[in-house]
Image (cartoon, coloured by chain):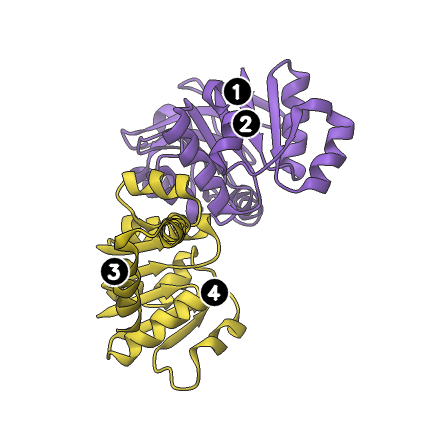
Chain colours: A purple, B yellow
């Protein structure tokens, strides 16, 4: 795949290194001259100095034949414009934007960005998961659908303890897809029984998330 | 009219003062309080400090009741993003943005955002001024009148 990464901060740097190790063709664009020169010493000619929002430079970097554009600068407005211009001017099939302010995730999707990644939300969800067992943690959403992938932890006072999946009054639009017990993720069977500390991964429509929570939460 | 202006630079502060003088309800947003000095002591509008691409800041500025939104910061991308938030999230019908880069101005104009590219505009006028285009004097006098009123 031909991937263009815009923004050579820590994320852009490690991402480009990783992708090129895996054999992908990479260009890493960085606006700052000093940063670009520094990284070029290590990474060589994959580093290109220039503003990823300037159409002339986008053209030079090969946006026209890119499979994916990844915009990971520290500024949400730049990431948005890079992805929108990539779609509009160069018909890039897939755009990924880093979102610093979690409130921008839904906005970016509404404005045509294919995928958004928010480290702020990811870290927030992890902290949330640590402090509130029984809470439904969103892991991801299926694109353009109303279906979410969620995780919920079974506490030692959860009403589902010792019960089989088949016995749970699960909403029709919820599906348990995995139970993570210790270090192992299992594919659940109808007679799999829940144990304390299980992390249950489920697909659920947004409207039934609350119902799913009330099945697992301590009474 | 309730007008929100993003960016209190030379252009933003000039329009803000004019609109406030004409009895419009003006709210101006800038990331630094220093910028508000340009408004002078007689400015009657509201001043909000914050990032104009942050929906909470825009709400604090009263965007939900705004009739018009002008994005006039120094950053093209900030203006582009703020304009899209105003239009798509808050459904403001009158959204205008200043963009320096002619290519970006054209691209976003095509998707329906009103963009004013001051680079193209100034270049065109300056060219006309040396070539001696008849329309030049007329355009300049019209623009000056618009700017003062």
Q: CA distance from mark 2 to mark 1?
A: 6 Å
Q: Residue A202, image x and y in percent?
A: 42, 29
Q: Dot 4 surroundings within 10 Å: few (below 14), some, or many (20 or more)? A: some
The image's mark for residue B138 is: 3
Q: CA distance from mark 4 to mark 3?
A: 40 Å
- Marks 3 and 2: CB-CB under 8 Å? no
Q: Are marks 2 and 1 in contact (CB under 8 Å)?
A: yes
Identify the element where label 4 is drawn.
loop
Location of the N terminus of chain A (image quadrant): top right
Query: Above or below — where is B11 with respect to A31?
Result: below
Q: Residues within 10 Å of mark 2 (few under 14, many from 20)?
A: some
Residue at (48%, 18%) from the top-left corner?
A65
The CA span between labels 3 and 1 is 77 Å
Residue labelled with disc 2: A180
Q: Do tag 1 and tag 4 residues touch (Cβ < 8 Å)?
A: no
Taking A55 as reference, is B102 above or below it? below
Q: CA distance from mark 3 to mark 2?
A: 75 Å
- Residue A197 percent location from the top left of the image: 56, 36
* Left or right for A164, reference B133: right
Residue identifier under label 4: B50
Closest to the observer, A167 or A88: A88
Q: Position of residue A168 (x, y in %)?
A: 35, 31
Label 1, on which residue?
A186
């Amino acid at each position: 795949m031909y991937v263009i990464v815009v923004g050579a901060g820590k994320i852009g740097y490690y991402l480009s290194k990783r992708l090129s190790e895996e054999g992908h063709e990479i260009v890493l664009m960085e606006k700052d001259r000093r940063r670009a020169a520094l990284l070029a010493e290590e990474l060589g000619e994959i580093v290109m100095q220039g503003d990823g929002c300037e159409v002339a430079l986008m053209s030079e970097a090969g946006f026209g034949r890119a499979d994916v554009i990844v915009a990971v600068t520290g500024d949400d407005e730049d990431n948005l414009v890079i992805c929108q211009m990539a779609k509009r001017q160069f018909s890039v099939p897939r755009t990924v934007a880093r979102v610093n302010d979690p409130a921008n995730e839904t906005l970016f999707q509404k404005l045509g960005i294919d995928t958004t990644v928010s480290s702020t939300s990811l870290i927030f969800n992890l902290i949330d998961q640590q402090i509130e067992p029984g809470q439904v943690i969103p892991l991801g959403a299926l694109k353009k659908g109303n279906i979410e992938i969620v995780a919920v932890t079974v506490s030692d006072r959860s009403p589902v303890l010792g019960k089989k999946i088949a016995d749970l009054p699960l909403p029709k639009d919820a599906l348990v897809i995995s139970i993570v017990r210790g270090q192992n993720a299992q594919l659940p069977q109808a007679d799999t029984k829940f144990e304390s500390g299980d992390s249950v991964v489920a697909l659920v429509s947004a409207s039934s998330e609350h119902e799913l929570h009330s099945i697992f939460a301590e009474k | 009219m309730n007008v929100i202006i993003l960016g209190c630079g030379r252009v933003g502060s000039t329009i803000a003062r004019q609109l406030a003088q004409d009895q419009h309800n003006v709210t101006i947003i800038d990331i630094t309080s220093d910028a508000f000095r340009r408004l002078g002591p007689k400015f009657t509008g509201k001043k909000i400090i914050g990032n104009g691409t942050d929906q909470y800041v825009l709400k604090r500025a009263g965007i939900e009741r705004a009739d018009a939104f002008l994005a006039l910061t120094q950053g093209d991308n900030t203006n582009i993003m703020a304009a899209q938030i105003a239009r798509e999230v808050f459904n403001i019908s009158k959204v205008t943005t200043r963009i320096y880069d002619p290519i970006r101005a054209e691209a976003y104009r095509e998707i329906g955002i009103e963009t004013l590219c001051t680079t193209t505009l100034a270049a065109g006028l300056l060219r006309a001024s040396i070539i001696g285009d008849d329309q030049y004097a007329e355009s300049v006098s019209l623009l000056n009148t618009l700017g003062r009123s």
